[in-house]
Amino acid sequence: AALVERYQRDIFNLAYRSTHHRQDAEDITQETFLRAFRSLPSYDVSRPLRTWLYAIAVNVCRDWARRRTSRPQTVTLLDTDGPVDGAGVVSGTAAIGPDGGGRVDGAGSNSAAQPEQLFLRREAQQLVESAVMALEPDYRLPVVLFYMRGVPQADIAEMMGGSLSVVKNRLFRARQRLRAVLSDVLGEAVNDA
């Protein structure tokens, strides 16, 4: 029970960022902990528990992506801006810069922005979220983990069972794909920013 309480929010956020569907994210979270409890006797105590759980969650997300057939690729986030906290409240936004760098802005950054600016920012965010969801799972998961969850690339490599160079390559290719897709929609802002 303590394991679930401590990591449930993180696993749910990863699943939600991978699926953008609350029910699927809840199912993935539950399946992750079921698999973890079944595999607990084989857990290597020399590995960080968080990394081990994330690796299980990544595999469950991959399984979900393979099984998914009729779910649309578009994302509607009318009332969501970022990771979901334990109370179901969404906070924060993620952005991928033109240099490939990322940042996560917290919900506490309420500036005195004009309504039009807020609308345009939310619309751009929805486009980015939709583009991320359209990526193949092997590209989407590193993007979600690195840019939206702030997980170090070395940890992502361990979670995904690959090398650091593979993770860096997938992030690079994902940025290229996102830039290509988003430049058509957002125009020069993506290329000039």
Image (cartoon, rainbow, N blue to C red):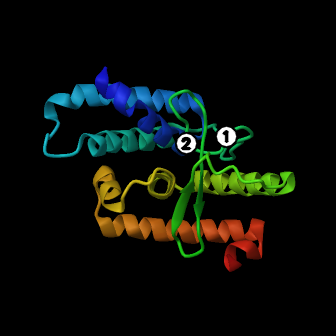
Quadrant position of the N terminus in the picture: top left
Q: What secondary structure is found at the residue carrying circle 1?
A: loop
Q: Point out which mark residue 80 bears.
A: 1
Real-space Cα separation, disc 1 to disc 2, in angstroms: 8 Å
Front residue of 121 and 60 = 121
Front residue of 117 and 172 = 117
Q: Residue at (61%, 46%) from the top-left corner?
A: 108
Q: Residue at (14%, 29%) from the top-left corner?
A: 41
Q: Residue at (43%, 38%) from the top-left corner?
A: 10
Q: Residue at (61%, 38%) from the top-left corner?
A: 90
Task: Identify the amino acid type marked 1.
Answer: Thr
The quarter of the displayed image where residue 63 is located: top left
Judged left or right of residue 150, residue 40 is left
Q: Residues within 10 Å of mark 1 (few under 14, many from 20)?
A: some
> Which percent across, then down, holds residue 70?
63, 37
Q: Residues within 10 Å of mark 2 (few under 14, many from 20)?
A: many
Quadrant position of the C terminus in the picture: bottom right
The quarter of the displayed image where residue 181 is located: bottom right
Task: Identify the amino acid type marked 2.
Answer: Pro
Q: What secondary structure is found at the residue carrying circle 2?
A: loop
Q: Is residue 30 above or below residue 140?
A: above
Q: Is residue 11 above or below residue 117?
A: above
Name of the residue lying farthest toward the front: 112
Q: Point out which mark residue 123 bears.
A: none
Judged left or right of residue 187, residue 175 is left
Residue labelled with disc 2: 83
> Which percent across, then down, holds residue 92?
59, 47
> Which percent across, then down, holds residue 15?
48, 39
